[in-house]
Amino acid sequence: MEEVQRVRMPRSGEVLGVVESMLGANKLMVRCQDSKIRICRIPGKMRKRIWIHENETVIVEPWSIQGDKRGDIVWKYTSTETGWLRRKNILKI
């Protein structure tokens, strides 16, 4: 029997990450799964609708310019989804 997957997975060009610290002005320091630390911003469409705290799991879309240092947050996982990602060995941070 095939398991139904309802958790959003990173698409091409996206990477999983864990928020390390809040920098202020809608910027976060995120440790990404590709072993890079990026300064990420929360885009305007998410800024007022979602609250992101330290140690939460997010999906980061690196910028085309300065992609190793900067990116945008495109998705935030709930604690239940984060536990599922860890059990399936998808999140290895």
Image: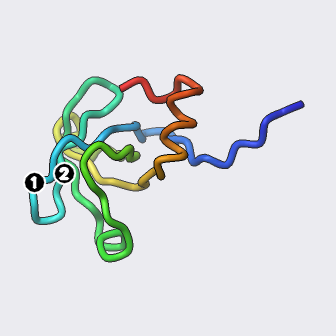
Q: Position of residue 68 (x, y in %)?
A: 21, 34
From the viewer's perspective, tell me whether residue 88 is left or right of residue 40. right
Q: In the displayed structure, does residue 30 sit left or right of residue 77?
A: left
Q: Is residue 40 left or right of residue 11?
A: left
Q: Are marks 2 and 1 in contact (CB under 8 Å)?
A: yes
Instruction: State the image quarter where residue 76 is shown.
Output: bottom left
Mark number, residue 90: none
Amino acid at circle 2: Leu
Q: Amino acid at mark 1?
A: Leu
Tag 2 secondary structure: strand
| C-alpha separation, residue under disc 2 versus residue under disc 1 | 5 Å
Give the residue at x 67% y 49%.
6
> What is the crowding at mark 1: few (fewer than 14 residues within 10 Å), some, or many (at least 20)?
few
Q: Residue at x 42, y 23 (%)?
A: 92
Disc sitting over residue 23 in the figure: 1
Which residue position is annotated with label 2?
28
Q: Quadrant of the N terminus?
A: top right
* Residue that appears at 36% across and 73% down: 45
Could you tell me which residue is drawn at 60 percent across and 46 percent down? Answer: 7
Instruction: Where is residue 70? Give x, y as percent.
Output: 19, 44
In-front residue for pair 90/12:
90
